[in-house]
Image: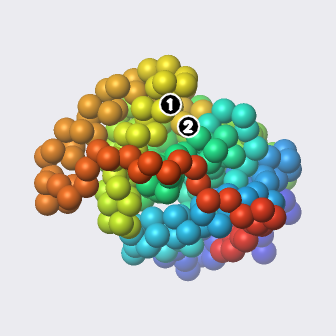
Amino acid sequence: MCATGALACFPAFASPAAADEEHERAIGRQVYDDQRRQGQILDVSPFYPVLRQVGRRIAAAAAPHWWAAKFIIVKGTQPNAFSTPGGWVYVNEALLTMAANDDELANVVGHETGHIVLGHVMNRLQQAQDINLLLALAGLFVHSQGAANAYAVARLGATYGFLNFSRQQEYQADHEGVILAAKAGYNPWGMIWFFRTLSRTSGSSAGFEQYVQDHPATPDRIKRLEAFFASDPARFGKWKDRKPAATGLQRVPGARLVLNPS
């Protein structure tokens, strides 16, 4: 029987792969519950339909994967997006308002999905040097030590230190994001268009992930993406740096969050 206060419990006969999936599900659910307790999740937003439509296409482009994609809109006055293991992608309304078209949103969602596909969150956790954090994770995700341990992981969820990706991981997610966007039928130049907007409004060191403490310089990210496009004409050659004239994402008043937390 699982200990009181446990967020996850694994049978002795679970395979390593199944246990890994349960680990990631537990982390993803913990962050969602934490955001819910903090009142950050928006249950009603006119951007839910476009986020779900774009997100589902990106998730399909990332297949095969064991997780079910989940798209959540959160509060915030500065553009922000992040993802957690188990297929959770969070975008705030400030970013959705800034996105000029579906291509830009698709590349942002692609970048966040890229972090999931590439296992960046789990990698950061494995590299953690804080012994108390490591003990808390070991207790929760292996044998579960009860309520005190659940509290330690709740603190982890509150700070999101595990989302402080390295610059190399950010570059990797940029590349994976444009690959997924192109595969889903969106213009990968949308990532560059969004970076250009960020640079104009927030400066050359800005990034759309607020939890990343040391963003790569935006001009450098743009140059790297342009070089990446040029290096693979078979994949990216048909796409052009021609931003659509229409601006703004479609809005549906009264649209609501639809969540399948599995």
Helix, strand or loop at mark 2:
loop
Q: Report x, y in % for residue 43.
A: 81, 60
Q: Is residue 143 left or right of residue 19?
A: right
Residue visible at 60% across and 63% down?
Answer: 50
Please say which color scheme the image uses: rainbow
Question: Can residue 136 be seen at all in this image of the molecule?
Answer: no
Query: Against 33, is 197 above or below?
Result: above
Q: Earlier in the sequence, mark 2 or mark 1?
A: 1
Q: Amino acid at mark 2?
A: Glu
The image quadrant where one finds the N terminus is: bottom right
Q: Report x, y in % for residue 131.
A: 60, 34
Helix, strand or loop at mark 1:
helix
Residue at mark 1: 198
Residue visible at 79% across and 46% down?
Answer: 40
Residue visible at 70% across and 54% down?
Answer: 73
Residue at mark 2: 209
Q: Report x, y in % for residue 186.
A: 38, 60
Q: Nearer the viewer, mark 2 or mark 1?
A: 1
